Image (cartoon, rainbow, N blue to C red):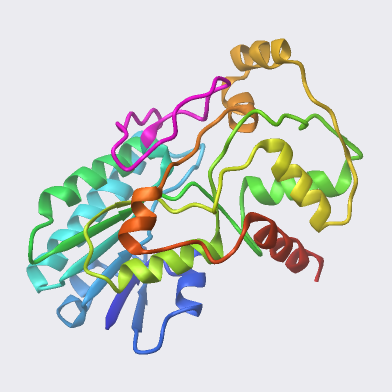
Amino acid sequence: MHVLMTGAQGYIGQQLCQSAPAGVQITAVSLRQHSIASLPLHTIDTIVHLSARVHQPAASASDYQRINHDQTLALATAAKAAGVKRFVFFSTMAVYGGHGSLGDPAPLTEQSPCLPDSPYGQSKYAAEQALQALADDTFSLAILRPPMVYGPGCPGNMARLQQLVAKLPILPFGWPDNRRSLVAIDNLVALSWQLIQQPIQGIFLPQDPAPLSIQTLVSLLAQAQQQQPLLVRPPGWLLTLASRLQPRITNSLFGSLYYDNQQTCQILNYSPPLSSADAIQKMCQNAQK
């Protein structure tokens, strides 16, 4: 199998390249450096499209649209015309919209309505719709919608939370009543390669074996770093007030936003190889080296 991978220099792309199964040839390209017309698409079996404009405060809605929708559609159109048989698109949980809810919302599934409320989520959902219009019996399409990805050397919020747990003796994260979907990089890579190598079409939701509360997540981070911070439970009324004043931060930490991905697991006959505890332990051990 000859796979062309865009965005291979990113966190997920690097891990996918390093774990490529035997018999898979990867051509890694940067769409910043290579035009679509210059790509050797006639030699490619499958495209794995990771390249994207992600959360960047300075980016405009048109920037997101140009990179995440227009460029994706142009690549897929050229690929189909060149005879590429499969396109695997890394989308995002952001297509569902929101940052969580302090109530107890129903889990998201592959069939849940998409109501993106950010330029990033809107542009990725627009790309999904454009790709689905191209897909047919000769051009199969798989869409992955990962939640927050974490693992050794990961960027973003998980790395910041890990550092916070290592430094502070008291943390206001003793809240057991929310559920968040996360996916360890090892679990995402395992599912991704299984999907890349199978001609299965559809939408797929990767996540760890079970969603976590913020209390459980912080406790696992503390145990992995041999720390014992005091986790204070904030009162419900305070969280309600905070969600009105700072809804994004409050709902991201204390709200629920999680998947029921039984359909994904059944279709692929897949179960995550790592528990959240083992994945967090591995991440923290790597940070201590």
Q: Is residue 150 magenta?
A: no
- In the picture as drawn, the residue positioned furthest to the bottom comes out as 23
Q: In which quadrant is the C terminus drawn?
A: bottom right
Q: Position of residue 265 (x, y in %)?
A: 39, 56
Q: Residue visible at 72% across and 29% down?
A: 175
| In the image, residue 139 above or below residue 98 | below
Camera sees residue 11: no
Q: Number of marks in the image? A: 0
Camera sees residue 253: yes
Q: Position of residue 48 (x, y in %)?
A: 32, 66
Query: For residue 253, which quarter of the picture?
Result: top right
Q: Is residue 104 magenta?
A: yes
Principal SS element in the magenta part? loop
The one nearer the camera, 121 or 106, is 106
Q: In which quadrant is the N terminus drawn?
A: bottom left
| In the image, residue 209 above or below residue 238 | below
The one nearer the camera, 177 or 124, is 177
- Image check: 92 left or right of 2? right
Q: Residue visible at 36% across and 31% down?
A: 116
| In the image, residue 161 above or below residue 233 | below
Query: What segment carries the magenta color?
Result: 96-118
Q: Position of residue 248 (x, y in %)?
A: 57, 26
Q: Residue visible at 38% across and 53% down?
A: 52
The one nearer the camera, 263 or 127, is 263
Q: Position of residue 275 (x, y in %)?
A: 62, 59
| In the image, residue 152 above or below residue 22 | above
- Image check: 7 left or right of 113? right
Q: Residue visible at 35% across and 42% down?
A: 63
